[in-house]
Amino acid sequence: MSLDFDYVLVGGGLSNGLIALALLARRPAPRVALIEQGSTVGGNHTWSFHETDLGDAERELVEPLVRRTWPSYDVFFPSRARRIVAGYTACDGSRLHRVVAERFARAPASELLLESRAAVVQPNAVQLLSGRVLRAGVVLDGRGFASSELEAVHRGGYQKFVGLELELAAASPVACPVLMDARVEQVDGYRFVYVLPFSHRRVLIEDTYYSLSPELDRERVRARVLEYAESRGYHVSGVAREEHGVLPIPTSAASVPNSAGIAVGMRASWFHPTTGYSLPSAARFAERCAACSLSELPRAASEFSREHEKRVGFARFLNRLLFGGFAPSERRHVLERFYGLPEDVIERFYALRSTALDRACILWGRPPRGFSIGQMLLGDRTV
């Protein structure tokens, strides 16, 4: 049976978008099909990373998607304020879509199928709802999970958020990103606000919760974003766009169902268990994918999963402590203590490269305020 494509990528999220870019740039004359049920690749999302999260090759891959890079970022807690001098970068879905569409337009043997839904996914073929069958050397399944499916897949807590990109009538009161402002009222678990000042008159503010419930009251949280903006001196003239999400904060390995194709991205649990950051892992696998032959790819994906599991075990353990050992109102003390550690320890934790000494540094000493062995023993059954 002749093949229509070498690679068929199901789902047009971050992972498959980066895989497509890497294949089209690095492989000799690849035939790639990318299937996305929506009208754009990447959707309405913002992805960020720290400068030490990526190697040179990964940074080159994502460079066209970069919206803004800052030389430092701030964190604020009731008893701690700190500026971390380390590069921080934000990318967005609109740039991912534009770059992917341009690359496919220059690759006549490849095809970008938007507003197309996969009805049947097999290891070497995908049938669309339209009836069309795409035969491939390999199928990569990057469809992820709907928020309603997370409880059946992941055990632990959730990071949920609503973000508003705001247009300002006056200059933004901050020029440096705020990764965590935990000086806000602690409701529904650990709550903090995340701020990205893209320009003097454009800022993204996200209200985020580390909660045991995946329920997200978007209207209520949206109102809290605007309340925060007003209380911090942002003169809002309009809302340019809104994004929201519910991400897993797992305390153990996911019970991911078998996929007919090779599972990638969030579907394969390739993300940071504590922060939810997925771009570094997606970029690393995209480069790995482009570096190996078609026949080597299944083994390369299995090896990547094993490597990732070794990286994330400590972070999942910390998640168990966070959700199991602290009452919801006390969880911010854990992060407050974490941001008192040396900068290189913080950087390696974000990059999932913590050393044995780093792990000892994070755990050593008096526990953060609010830790309870009783809470740990009697904690929520999901932890």
Image (tube, rainbow, N blue to C red):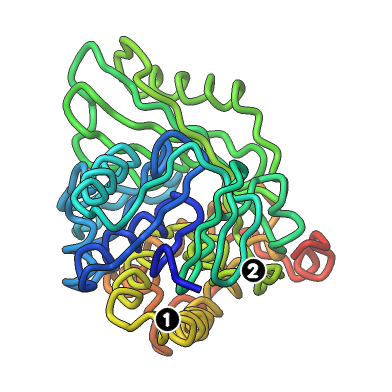
- Foreground pick, 306 / 355: 306
Toward which corner of the image does residue 193 lie, by quadrant? top left
The answer to whether residue 209 is visible is no
Where 84 falls versus 304 (above or below)?
Answer: above
Toward which corner of the image does residue 252 lie, by quadrant? bottom right
- Residue 235 in percent (x, y) is at 29, 14
- The residue lying at 35 percent from left, 63 percent from top is 19
Hey, what amino acid is under mark 1? Leu
- Foreground pick, 343 / 240: 240
According to the image, label 2 marks what residue? Answer: 259
Q: Quadrant location of the C terminus? A: bottom right
According to the image, label 1 marks what residue? Answer: 297
Quick check: 190 left or right of 284?
right
Quick check: 172 left or right of 17?
left
Mark toward the start of the polypeptide (2 vs 1): 2
Hey, what amino acid is under mark 2? Ser
- Residue 33 in percent (x, y) is at 40, 56
Residues tagged 2 and 1 counted as in contact (Cβ below 8 A): no
